[in-house]
Image: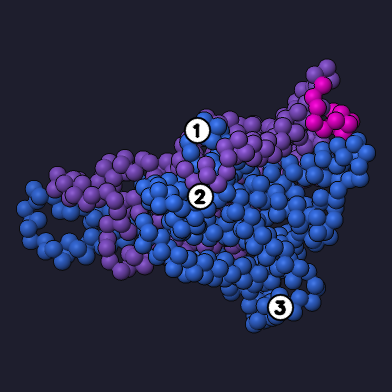
Chain colours: A blue, B purple
Amino acid sequence: MPRKATASSTSPPGEVDAPRITTAWRNRFGTIANGLLTLPALVVYAGLLVVPVGFAVYYSFTEYNGFPSSPPQWIGLHNYERIFQDPAGDLHSSLWVTAVIAVAGTVIVNAAALGLALLLRRTTRFNTFARLVMFYPRVLSALIVGFLWQAILGPQGAVNNLMERAGQSTLPFLADPEWALVTLVGVIVWAQFGVQLILYLAGLQAVSAELQESARIDGASGVQVFRHVTWPALAPTVTVTLVTTVLSLLKVYDVVLGLTNGGPGDATQNWAYEILAVTFAKNDIGLASAQAVLLVLVAGILSFTIIALRRRAEAGAEAIG
Amino acid sequence: MTGKRMFPKAMRVAVVAVLCAAMLVPMYIMVVNAFKPQQEILRSPLGLDLSTATFDHLAAAWQSTAFPVIEGYAVSLFLVLACNAVAIGASVPGAYAIARTPTPLFAFLLMFFVAGMFIPAQIILVPAIFVLKALGLMGTFPGLVLFMSATMIPFTLFVFSGYIRMLPRSLDDAAAIDGAGRQRILWTIIFPLMRPIVATAFILNTLSAWNDFVSPQLILGPGSQFRTITTGVYAAVSTYSTNYEIVFPTLLLAVTPILLIFAIMQRHIIGGLSSGAVKG
């Protein structure tokens, strides 16, 4: 730590005037010193994450090309109008792509993760190995995952090559707009569900084994035990996994870049791709900022909606636990 | 257990085995094709003919000017360590102050940090670039480290403050009576007790810094002398994405060390992830 808080230490007992320092004084010093302790984190976080959000809000009301020679021109809500009216006709399709990735991805990732967590619940050697195999894509960079699947599913990739050799027609995994979007979601699921699997496994450990056992003794079937005991008790985990999946799927960029580079055409250009690779690349900082502001808003609103909606389910979990 | 009744055991093992194979096939394809010339890759993407297998393409990827492998590793490693040092170093005192000051102001401060977890970092990078420019840090390594640390601080500080709350306050008081100052209490008494949660934060921050592509690409710039693993792979592969002689060996070089580290550290990585999630 570079800084030291000199006034912070409680006065040493040996000092003569120590008793004269009143508790109120000490408390106030304590608060200031504690405030100073938060300063490094506050400066870095606010300076490079919160201030940029403020800049984004400001730029979103301006026309700005990012060059210091031409300062931002205030144009009010024009950038937002451009997004809603979409004169160039590319933003609405990227909204659709983002929604498909977020909704379909979240559902499939969580269903796959929960299903496998139930299958891999017991700690046997086989299950531990399987968990590792499901999880390992998480340690790979999303960009590399994209490039790898591109090499496998591309027009000349491994799969199509094999099919051609087998005398079958090739499949347009990445060449057809609709196929490409489905492939993209598939690759994202492949890369991401392992993380949520680990979270579900951790959540399952917290489910009371006695409760499940007594439900079974009372004659409940496996499905009934899951529906009435396990699933409600998992509620807090489900909230965490839903929020983290939605947040991470809203902003996917690297995997798109590696897998399809937004193509064919703009079939797999999602909102993040639009911001970083299209609008920002055209130096349209005002529009890029408006898009960023909207994405931050949507991410925040969706997270809080999920958390609020899950409150009731979690209250049920507490009642059971 | 539940699974047993819903699903017979043999079927369960079969389903899991098939899924494991599906998870591993891409790795298999990457590895075998890294040792084959282009025609061979196109002719039989799954096979490996040991008589024609060659290290030539791997060597070429190793010497690639677009992606200097050793330097890429050095840069990525340094980036990971620097970001962790800044993020953890700044979060420990911040979390300590927040955890030990039960006033509304500090409760609000915690919420202010937590809100950062909902900001998608790579999206806010565009305006952050202008902040970095104003600070004269654009295109520099310190600028990159500061931005990436800023994205790590919310989660790190949040889990730290939750952990410090569980440490008894009497520890602080006893040390204070013995004459230890605040900094001393923090770094010699509290910090050593935080080892498990520091390890969790370190692992998660390391994974996100190591795999980050957008921040180094945009902050350092595509023409930068510094290439991380990710920006190096992008420089080497993106324009030659159908030249599999380049793609597979480059990807193999890029993923082998991290996979080895994962294989060795898997218990800590997975354990850290689940404990972080439970606390988050």
Q: Is residue B89 above or below residue A248?
A: above
Type of amino acid under label 1: Thr
Q: Secondary structure at mark 1?
A: loop
Q: Is residue A309 above or below residue B148?
A: below
Q: Is residue B272 magenta?
A: no
Type of amino acid under label 3: Phe
Which is nearer the N-term, disc 2 or disc 1?
Answer: 1
Residue sitting nearer the eye, A103 or B194: A103
**Nearer the observer, disc 2 or disc 3?**
2
Can you tell which mark lies on residue A124?
Answer: 1
- Residue at the disc numbered 2: A222
Q: Secondary structure at mark 3?
A: helix
Q: Chain of mark 1?
A: A
Q: Which residues are magenta?
A: B37-49
Q: Residue at x 15, y 53 (%)?
A: A11
Q: Residue furthest front?
A: A219
Q: CA distance from mark 2 to mark 1?
A: 20 Å
- Residue at the disc numbered 3: A84
**Nearer the observer, disc 2 or disc 1?**
2
Quadrant showing the C terminus of chain A: bottom left
Residue B7 shows in this picture: yes
**Nearer the observer, disc 3 or disc 1?**
1
Query: Is A261 left or right of B196, judged from the image as shown?
Result: right
Quadrant of the rendered structure where residue B67 is? top right
Type of amino acid under label 2: Gly
Q: Chain of mark 3?
A: A
